Amino acid sequence: MTSFALHHVQLAIPAGSEDACRAFYLGVLGMTEVAKPPVLAARGGLWVRAGTLEIHLGVEADFRPALKAHPGILVDDLDEVTARLAAHGTEVTPDGEFPGHRRCYAHDAVGNRLEFLQPL
């Protein structure tokens, strides 16, 4: 049987918000930027990575932030992540309703919803 794995998650961003997204994903979360292939770089946006997690932030003309849809990002220290988010003025919403994990929600620089989970 064919195996499946997640290569990346795509989130939309408005045109011109790349610097704000860099500040959030690189500066706050500590991710690194991945060079986009030249043919795709012309479209704007950026790609970021932490460990095996890759998020592609693509420009969308009629951008609306994802309010319900979201990536669930596994972390090994939820307290550290929430402290970094809070230190940069990002509102963090704790949620203990997911068995086997501690979790919280936050929004990125353009309003996309993100879930952070720490396995117990």
Image (tube, rainbow, N blue to C red):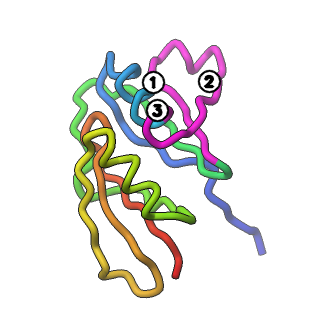
Q: Residues within 10 Å of mark 3 (few under 14, many from 20)?
A: some
Q: Amino acid at mark 3?
A: Gly
Is 1 a magenta residue?
no
Identify the residue shown where x is 60% and y is 41%.
Answer: 49
The disc, 2 or 1, on the residue closer to the chain's N-terminal end is 2
Left or right: 108 in relation to 5: left
Amino acid type of the residue that numbered disc 2 sits on in the rendered structure:
Lys
For discs 3 and 2, the disc positioned in front in the rendered view:
3
Residue 78 in the figure: left or right of residue 98:
right
**Element carrying mark 3:** helix
Q: Which residue is mark 3?
A: 27
Tell me the SS state at disc 2: loop
81 in relation to 45, above or below: below
Q: Residues within 10 Å of mark 1 (few under 14, many from 20)?
A: many
Q: Which mark is residue 36?
A: 2
Mark 3 or 1 closer to N-term?
A: 3
Task: Please state which amino acid type lies under the numbered disc 1.
Answer: Gly
- Please state the horizontal and vertical placement of residue 106, each as a whole percent of the image: 29, 53
Provide residue 5's location: percent of width, then percent of height.
67, 61
The residue at the far bottom in this view is 99
Q: Callout 2: few (<14), some (14-19), or many (20+) C-alpha neighbours within 10 Å? A: some
Which residue lies under the disc numbered 1?
45
The part of the chain drawn in magenta is: 26-50
State yes or no: discs 2 and 1 in contact (Cβ < 8 Å): yes
Q: Residue at x 35, y 47 (%)?
A: 85
- Label 3 and label 2: CA atoms lie apart by 19 Å
Q: Residue 70's mark?
A: none
Q: Is residue 108 above or below residue 99?
A: above
